[in-house]
Amino acid sequence: MTEFVFPINIFSRDIPQNFREFKNKHYKDMVKTILIEDNKVFERFVDNLISELCADKDFNTSILTGIDKLYIMLILRAQCVSHEITFTSETTDDEKAQVKIPVSMAEIIETLGGYELEYTYTVTDGKIKIDGTLPKGLYYEDVYDVAADTLSSITFNGTVTDVTKISLQKKRNILSTLPSFVLPEILTYIQKQDEIVKEKPIISINTQKKLPFNTKFDMHLYNGTIPEIIKMLFNTQLKEFYNNEYILMRRFKFSYEAIQECTPLELAMYYDIIHSDIEREKAEQEQQSKGGSLDPAPSAMAPESG
């Protein structure tokens, strides 16, 4: 069976991976998940979504870092939802005006790709070698969890042990058994990378308007800002989904299955086409109405009988 896929580069491996489209059904489920306001549920949703949309089922998605996941979600949004995000707010000046400020998704993606990060590390004393990446999760309880979640593999006596698929608790147990020099080196690596991403905001809103929120959004690798950025870029009114579905099914005879299988961008295009078609028909009807209401010319009137 053929299907449309597109490549997204995996930063931590520097390889492209093919992904399926992010569809309207995924978008609605994501908004529902955001509304629950449960960090563990949201993280599980993002992980499952990425696994579902990854076209290669043999690809080990458990190797993905938080930065990888953010980049994947940014590309999915730009490709399947919209090329920009619009921030709507009321100004805090005397005018109290409603303003809409568009921000290009390409700018956010370019900023993320521009961080000169070391996506992997190796710690060794010649006897044991530990390979790791940037933190793989989205939320953490403490810095020890962060360090443990960077672990990817351990090589000892020529035997390589892959630890990417085991639980965080088991990674913590493994980290506690490693030589004492390992943890400080991992923490130094994490701190260095976090300082790099803090140098430039991931999102900057360029406006002269006085807004009730900070126009620059900083990102950190392990304090929960990465999933909050994802939420901000995908969150919308849940009611809009049901309203749009009702209109498309009731007035324009779309099937529910067709709506769910479309991308949000495709549905927006259908709305534009429908709107343009309605406006055209309306203009034609108005023109016909004007033409039909003209009084007949006197010469065309029947002569009076006398």
Image (tube, helix red, strand yellow):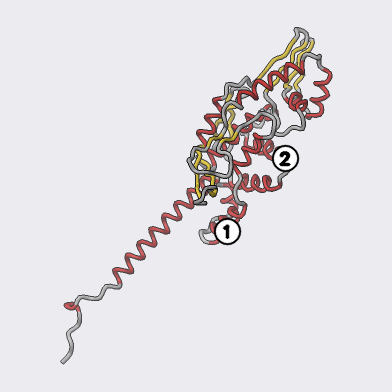
* Distance of label 2 from label 1 (alpha carbons): 31 Å
Single out the residue that lies furthest toward the bottom. 306
Check the picture and name the quadrant holding the N terminus. top right
> In the rendered image, which quarter is residue 290 located in?
bottom left
In the rendered structure, the answer to whether residue 147 lies left or right of residue 215 reads right
> On the image, numbered disc 2 is attached to which residue?
39
Q: Residue 37 appears at what percent x and percent y?
A: 71, 45
Q: Secondary structure at mark 1?
A: helix
Would residue 26 appear left or right of 38 to someone viewing this image? left
153, above or below 306, in the image? above
Q: Position of residue 102 (x, y in %)?
A: 49, 42
**Label 2 element class:** helix
Q: Earlier in the sequence, mark 2 or mark 1?
A: 2
Q: Position of residue 120 (x, y in %)?
A: 66, 19
Quarter of the image for residue 87 reads: top right
188 up-or-down from 290: above or below: above
Residue 81 location, quadrant: top right
Q: Nearer the viewer, residue 186 or 30?
A: 186
Along the viewing direction, whichever of 23 and 127 lies nearer the viewer: 127
On the image, numbered disc 1 is attached to which residue?
246
Question: Circle 2: is it few (<14), some (14-19), or many (20+) Cα within 10 Å?
Answer: some
Q: CB under 8 Å between callouts 2 and 1?
A: no
Q: Is residue 1 visible?
A: no
Give me the residue at 62% from left, 31% from top: 219
Q: Toward the viewer: 16 or 229?
A: 229
Q: Is residue 137 visible?
A: yes
User: What amino acid is labelled 2 in the image?
Assistant: Asn
Q: Quadrant of the C terminus?
A: bottom left
Question: Could you tell me how many numbered marks the image carries?
Answer: 2
